[in-house]
Amino acid sequence: MKKILLALGLAVSVALPALAQAREVTFTTELLDYGGDGAYMALYLTDASGAYQGTLWVAGKKSKYYKHLSGWARGSRLDPAEYDGLTGASITSGRTLKITLDLDDTLIDSGHEVLVDTAVEDMRDNRADVSVPLTTEGAGKPVSGRGYVRSFRYDF
Amino acid sequence: MLRKLHGLPGLFAVVFLVTLAVTGSILALAPALDRAGAVVPPAGEASVAQLAGRVVANYPGTEQIVRDLSGQVVVYYSRDGQAGADLVNPVTGERLGAYQPSAFFVWIRDLHRSFLLDTPGRMVAGISAALMLFVCLSGMVLLARRSGGWRALMRPLAGTGSKRVHAEMARLAVLGLLLSALTGSFMSAQRFGLIPEASDLGPGFPAEVSGGQPRPVDRLQALSQVDLNDLRELVFPYPDDPQDVYSLTTTAGSGFVDQATGELLQFQPRSTGSVVQQWIMRLHTGEGLWWLGLILGVAALAVPALSVTGTIIWWQRRRLSLQTQDNAAAAEADVIVLVGSEAGATWGFARALKAGLTKAGYRVHCAEMNALAHSYPRAGMLFVLTSTYGDGDAPASAGRFMDRLRDFRAGSALKYAVLGFGDRQFPNFCRFALEVDEALAGKGLSRIQPVELIDRCSAARFSEWGDRLGTAIGAPLSLSHDPVPPRTFRLELAGRVDYGLAVQAPTSILRFRLADAGQRWRSWFSRSGRNSLPVFEAGDLLGILPPKGQDARFYSLASSASDGVFEICVRKQPGGLCSGYLHGLKPGDSVEAFIRQNPGFRPVAGTVPVILIGAGAGIGPLTGFIRNNTDRNPMYLYWGGRSANSDFLYQPELGHYLEDRRLTGLSTAFSRSDERAYVQDRLRQDQTALRQMIDTGAQVLVCGGRDMAAGVKQVFEEILRPLRMDVDQLRAEGRYLEDVY
């Protein structure tokens, strides 16, 4: 279990610290048995217009492969400051990644979406393997991905 | 020392090295298989824009087009929310089949990379690659030392059995193995951060895109300017996102393409570091270099065989060097026997000497030469038995002897004798033994008897030396040691042709075959294989055991195993035991015999001229070489006999070979004819032509008596002088070989 306080630029600037309400959110990503090497994954948030807002987690240590997570790469501009402290090992075929973060309340039910980009060596890149709105209603409901993700859900 | 270092990693890492090699050989097939299935249009025929247009026509949901180095084009697409990947024909854009990386190859690759153990396994694989690199390099140094120099590496190898197989295979495979091990070590070192990785982040995403109406992909200018064969990867923009762009990676670099204007944005050429890195990867995997992949794969197959032969060699050396029991302590012994041995053969002789002396009542201490003590207080006799390694160097167990000898204090009573073992065919026959003999004399020791040099482990010479030694020390010694207990078989005389009676040089060509069919049957079906028929070639030696238990005598074979007969040429020596015995045989009579290989006396393969020189019965193996010359390489025979009418051995057969071009030229000399010529005279007459042939790389093989060989050598020194060469130099290059008796 990883517990990280996510400090999104937007959230901090709109909601002042005194008013800010944070909520613990757990993201669970289960992969298919796609039968290749460990998958690189980026979990990130976009706003209602689809613009990149911040990085939740990056699985995979070698930054030279990050460009294959193209949606995230484009949004984050691969600026190390965007993912510093938010990286871990790549996820092997069939395994599950579970991360827990403190998210600002203003990010929920406000049109924000969670996206997961995935890539595997010598296999396809999946921009937006998963893309799901972050809503109270959607919590606890698994959705399936289009690429290597068997199921994805968030709980709070 | 180096030999031990060469062997140890091999022994300890054998499982890993063999796994890496076998999996590597399998993986090496992949580039060739991929290439076979790929359609590669000629350069300039199609652009990336054309390819993308055709692909999109067939796959509206195309997300990514990847072209691998072997030319396969894979399209990743989604259709009705389902992701798919197909191999397509790059010319038509049509589907060739589903793209499914073979689970087998993926598994083999993981086994190769990490023994299926992920990071720790990758570390083991990396260390194994580094060990392989070390084994290759140390092996090359050892082989060069053994052959007598780096230049000599390509000449025919001497030796027999596992050692020879090991050396031959290593020589063939080493370059491939070196390349695989070097590139593998490099990639692993990079993986673990020991070597910095070239940064290859690619260009940053363009800050601004036009955001206009997207154009069809086949009308994007930047894509029409890239040849299809230069494409590595084209990632399509996310559907319905006008701000997104195409990401393009080519062999030259990577950048983005605006989907409305078709402009190339932020293009960044690949860094030199990244190009080098990719070449190292390709040299390792053979990706896009299918022929290299196959070569490396075949070379890797040598590793299991090298491991087996290497282990056998190690075991043999270990077994042979194990000390005999009841060894007297150095300080207590009357007699010291020191052994300098490379492959261990000398130890057998040392044990025989020790046994003989022990039987005569001496207390004997036997050790390797490197174990030379500071002094031997009780000893009266010191024997040094040593071989010579490569170009006159000390063998493995004697490398430190000369250094230790400097501090050696010899008692005034200590006397010594040196026995050298070697092969006369090598240029520096027994040189180390001679140096040791001199060095001991230099220490003020006196000799029991002069240094004796034994050619090719001759049991007879060793026994004679023992007899003389027994006389010298006043204690009869009966030394007998035959280093290789020969595997004998029974031969039956099938036919004989006699020559030379009229000129008092009775010489016969004797043809033997296996004594009875039953024996052959048994040998083919025997489970142990110990009775199986030996493999032999013309030039190998047939050892004949005379009937009364005397030592074997050796005759050069004129035939090969494939001829089905054992053919030798024997001159009856006055008073000769074995030759007399052989000359007395009638067809149907049988003898006990065995094969001793003689790989150092063989014509080179290839198109350089081979000059064969012989006298009398020495023509036997030379005729065999000519008989085998079915490739019609240039071969010239100079032969000397006594009389054309009486002892012209093989006359009809040689005429036949001249006709069918197996023999290019024949020159004979007869000493009891009007001309009174010797073979040396013929060589002198043809010296201009011979000099020219030597200059173009010709090889000389001499077979016959010692005096004749000395005469021939003298003539060749004259012939070579204008070329500023000498016979020793030719010998060192394996181009002057002698089989002398």
Image (cartoon, helix red, strand yellow):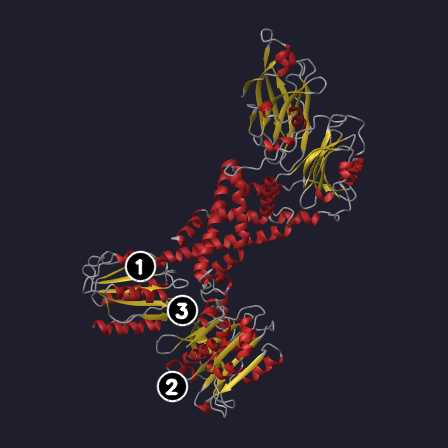
For label 2, the SS is loop
Horizontally, residue B534 falls left or right of residue B43, namely: left
Q: Which residue is at the front of the view, B78 or B194?
A: B194
Q: Which residue is mark 1?
A: B402
Pick the residue in front: B246 or B25.
B246
Q: Position of residue B120 (x, y in %)?
A: 49, 37
Kind of residue indicated by mark 2? Pro
- The answer to whether residue B703 is visible is yes
Point out the frontmost of discs 1 and 3. 1
Residue at which label 3 appears = B423
Nearer-N-terminus badge (1/2): 1
Q: Which mark is residue B574?
A: 2
Which chain is disc 1 placed on?
B
| Helix, strand or loop at mark 3 | loop
Of badges 3 and 2, nearer the viewer stands: 3
In the picture, measured across the screen, residue B146 lies left or right of residue B435, that is: right
Please state which amino acid type lies under the numbered disc 1: Met
Question: In 3D space, how far apart are the residues under numbered discs 3 and 2 (Cα atoms)?
Answer: 27 Å
From the viewer's side, name the closer residue of B169 and B484: B169
- The residue under the point 52% across, 41% down is B188
Position of residue A82 relative to residue B366, above or below, is above
Q: Secondary structure at mark 1?
A: helix
Apparent side of residue B696 relative to residue B570 in the rendered image (left or right): right
Q: Is residue B43 toward the left or the right of residue B103 in the image?
A: right
* Nearest-to-viewer mark from 1 and 2: 1
Q: Amino acid at mark 3?
A: Asp
Q: CA distance from mark 1 to mark 3?
A: 22 Å
Marks 1,3: beta carbons within 8 A: no
